[in-house]
Image (cartoon, rainbow, N blue to C red):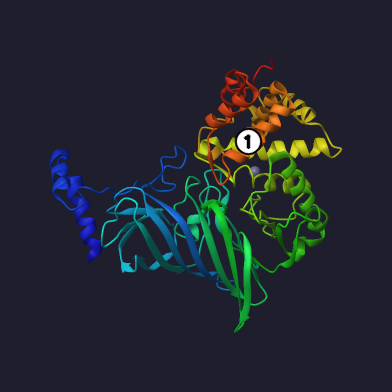
Amino acid sequence: TRRTAVLRREAVVVTVPVAVAALLAAAGPAAAGTTGASGVGDPYFPLAGNGGYHVEHYGLTLGYDTGSRHLDGTAVLTARATERLTRFDLDFSGLKITGLTVDHARADFRRSGQELVVTPRHSLHKGQKFRVTVTYNGVPKPVTDPDGSPDGWIPTDDGAFVAGEPQGAMTWFPANNHPKDKSSYDITITVPKGRTAVANGVLLGQRTAHGKTTFRWRQREPMAAYLATATVGRFQVEQYRTRDGIQVYNAVDPREAAAAAPVLKKLPSVLEWESKLFGPYPYRAAGSIVDHAPDVGYALETQTRPVYDSAPGLGTLVHENAHQWFGDSVSLTSWKDIWLNEGFATYAEWLYSEQHGGASAQKSFDALYARPASDGLWEFPPGDPGSGANIFGTPVYARGAMALHELRTAVGDPAFFRTLRAWAAQHHDGNGTTAQFVRLAERVSGKDLDGLFHTWLYEPGKPNKP
Ligand code: ZN
């Protein structure tokens, strides 16, 4: 079969001496091509994402049976090769694949852990646009992150809580699963009548027939795979436009409705306040998915529409929506830089409190700084958490926010807020690194900030206050 041919070729390569293998490779049809790396080189998640191509668009058509928890999917990826490719990888974990084509021709594939290795019938030349169609089905299971939390398609008593940071997207669709690769999405989901399926972006339409309802969602602005959702449940839905013309769609589990209502009412004013501070809201759609998912233990800033495992407090609403600028529009280049997401979203909470009659940011800083050197807050520095198990640890959130507060104190409010706005504007719909942020802060303020960032982002233990 085609599959054994692929395996045999690899077997040859591993058993012959390196020099002979190189000669064989040079003689074969693969000579001028590459096989696309199995990861983008992320030190914390080496298999996350893949090399050799960029996905421009995902078209996902899903059917979820909330009774049997069975998912049926077709994923159509429109991609472009960034080098000549004889084969390439996708990230996909768990579900059974029933068909795979590249440009409508059946392609060879094999699976190894989360890597789905695809060998198209014809190699792809550099710059070539191609289309991968994968049909699949099964009962999706979440993956367990290095920090122990469930991630991906997480079944609930009435549907599924769907979130993917940092790895879970691959539990429900084949993806180039790293924030470096951002794409537009169309997500169409069919669920039993009476359930609601909520994804990212704008609701294009919904239609009920034969006891099932289909929801069609479109996310036009580029999105990292981990920020995609297709959360299913029994939800109360509310839709309106803000004064700025943003389309809001809130879906709330009735069991959480009473607690969520006073907080969700503030969403338009929170988005307006954040827009004043950070620059224009990056998307045309917004909203909230308030699920009842007691086993999850976190909320996620799913793009345009954060998903909460229960009714959020106002601080969490401010936090997840601040991520729309910091994390979603400006995405990470490496998971190691996670403080660029979590430190910023946490600092947004501090600023919100300061400007709405609560504690000042200085007070929030002081309360944390008062913690003894033995406290978990000082366990590792936020700019270098050390491993994927630490990326959502307290130092990333709290000391990350402290680093921003120290920057603000050093450069003054005008330069600080100019820096935040310039960061959001310059990397809009793109990616950024810590080094780029440091350079920007220095350019805006005209100050040398290496020492400050070194102390707050990279120095182990509790920093001495200057
Ligand atoms: Zn966060």
Residue 413, x across and y down, in percent: 74, 28
Looking at the picture, tell me which residue is in the foreground, 464 or 325.
325
The furthest residue to the top:
466
Looking at the picture, tell me which residue is in the foreground, 21 or 265.
265
Identify the secondary structure beneath mark 1: helix
The furthest residue to the right:
357
Residue 277, x across and y down, in percent: 73, 39
200 sits to left or right of 243? left
Q: Is residue 19 above or below residue 328?
A: above
Q: In terms of image quadrants, where is residue 163? A: bottom right
Amino acid type at mark 1: Ala
Residue at position x 53%, y 47% in the image: 166
Residue 314, x across and y down, in percent: 78, 47
Q: Which residue is mark 1?
A: 422
164 sits to left or right of 17? right
Q: In terms of image quadrants, where is residue 446? A: top right
- Quarter containing the N terminus: bottom left
Looking at the picture, tell me which residue is in the foreground, 338 or 101.
101
Taking the image in four quarters, ligand 1 sits in the one at: top right
- Quarter containing the C terminus: top right
Asked whether the viewer can see residue 217, the reply is yes
Q: Any atom of ligand 1 within 8 Å of the CB at mark 1? A: no
Q: In terms of image quadrants, where is residue 94? A: bottom left
Mark 1 residue crowding within 10 angstroms, few (<14) / some (14–19) / many (20+): some
Residue at position x 59%, y 44% in the image: 327
The furthest residue to the bottom:
210
Residue at position x 48%, y 58% in the image: 57
Asked whether the viewer can see residue 384, the reply is no
Residue at position x 59%, y 46% in the image: 329
